[in-house]
Amino acid sequence: MHRFITLFVLTLLLIVTTSGQQTTTNIERRAAELHRQALVIDTHMDTLQRVLMQGADLGVRSTNGQSDLPRLKAGGVDAQFFAIWPDPMYAPHHAARRTLQLIDAMYGVLNKYPDRIELARNAADLERIVASGKLAALMGIEGGHAIQNDLALLRMFHRLGVTYMTLTHSNTNDWADSSTDKARWGGLNDFGRQVVREMNRLGMLVDVSHVSEDTVMDVLEVSTKPVIASHSSCLALCNHPRNLSDKALKAIAKNGGVIGINFFSGFVDQKYLDAMNAMQNDILATINEKKQIAPEDLDRVAAERLKLLDDPGIPRPPFARLLDHIDHAVKIAGIDHVGIGSDLDMIPTPEGMNDVSDMPKITKGLLERGYKEADIRKILGGNFLRVLRQATGR
Ligand SMILES: [Zn+2]
């Protein structure tokens, strides 16, 4: 009898183990298939910094950085927003030059690989380019100081193909408050409201990542179109002023907008953030203390900042942390208002998210957490496409 029981238990164990394995491979297969079929849009990536400052060739798979065309393809990314980020130290007088240099770097990639990547200016472009099998590239200016307080520059950047503008970076500018700087306007001032109206008129997406909560609320009052937070995570899970409070998440959802969850370790994991805040060095000081830098040193300091962020030497948070932020945003803002805004390239990221080729792990993680396939499609790109169409008008 005893022997039969042992045999029974062993058989049971065997069944449990193999069915467990089957579930795993099943989910992997489903995830790979779903990720391949779904429209995947990442609303923020800093790769053009490497192109401009390090001469990176995006056509070749590299071990440097976290993205290039082969790795974007491996990651199943269909449309990628490339950030046009004039480091705030270029403000006020050199910001437009830096912005144009980065747009030129984007055009360099587009011209070099016309059969692999093409510029999209609206939702219709995006869908057409993706259907042709190419990567749809979109540009987003990060930091309203880029326009040097002149709506003519905003219009010309739009004409060059810029689809969104993040109203501030880490600096409060002459018309909008940042979440990581002194509040000068209590949100937007009159010119800031004009900028939002002009962006609405042009069909440019207004991006509220980086701005203060007062600015978010002012933007939502003025904007006649849904807005985006191109790369922002959740304040409730990690107490960085760059992250969005539940109040902001709800307000963006009510406006019909979308929040692209940011992968940066210091925004998704409190322990990581605390360790970063404890770090001290000269280059960090130039960021945190907003020191003035001589014009001749601007490009050198920019290159050193890029290198520093690549690996600050702090243990990485678990991958689950990233999914936790998606969960929280979905819980607070709703399934129709969450997307992906990786902020990748030369940033510290959770375990497993080594570069953009790891993007399918998000799909797998969401399936494992019980998300429905239709809902995962919304997060991967469906939600953002809706907002892009509403903002650009086609
Ligand atoms: Zn940013």
Image (cartoon, rainbow, N blue to C red):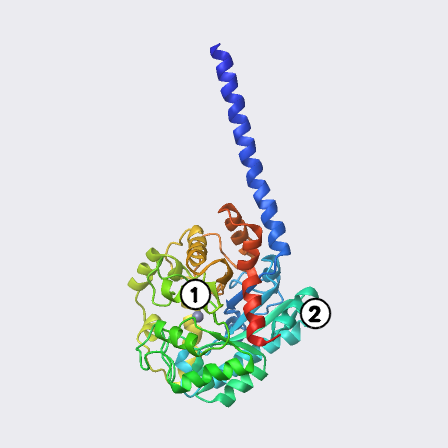
Q: Residue at x 42, y 88 (%)?
A: 93
Q: Is residue 303 in sight in this rendering?
A: yes
Vertical arrangement, residue 113 with respect to residue 268, above or below: below
Tag 2 residue? 115
Numbered disc 1: secondary structure: loop
* Kind of residue indicated by mark 1: Ser
Rendering quarter of residue 88 = bottom left
In the image, 340 versus 226, the foreground residue is 226
Q: Which of marks 2 and 1 is in front?
A: 1
Task: Where is residue 196? Give x, y as percent.
Answer: 46, 81
Specify the label residue 58 is tagged with. Answer: none
Rendering quarter of residue 130 = bottom right
* Kind of residue indicated by mark 2: Asp
Vertical arrangement, residue 323 with respect to residue 119, above or below: above
Task: Where is residue 10? Give x, y as percent.
Answer: 51, 21
Dot 1 surroundings within 10 Å: few (below 14), some, or many (20 or more)? many
Q: Is residue 168 in sight in this rendering?
A: no
In the image, 251 versus 85, the foreground residue is 251
Specify the label residue 232 is tagged with. Answer: 1
Say if disc 2 is inside 8 Å of ligand 1.
no
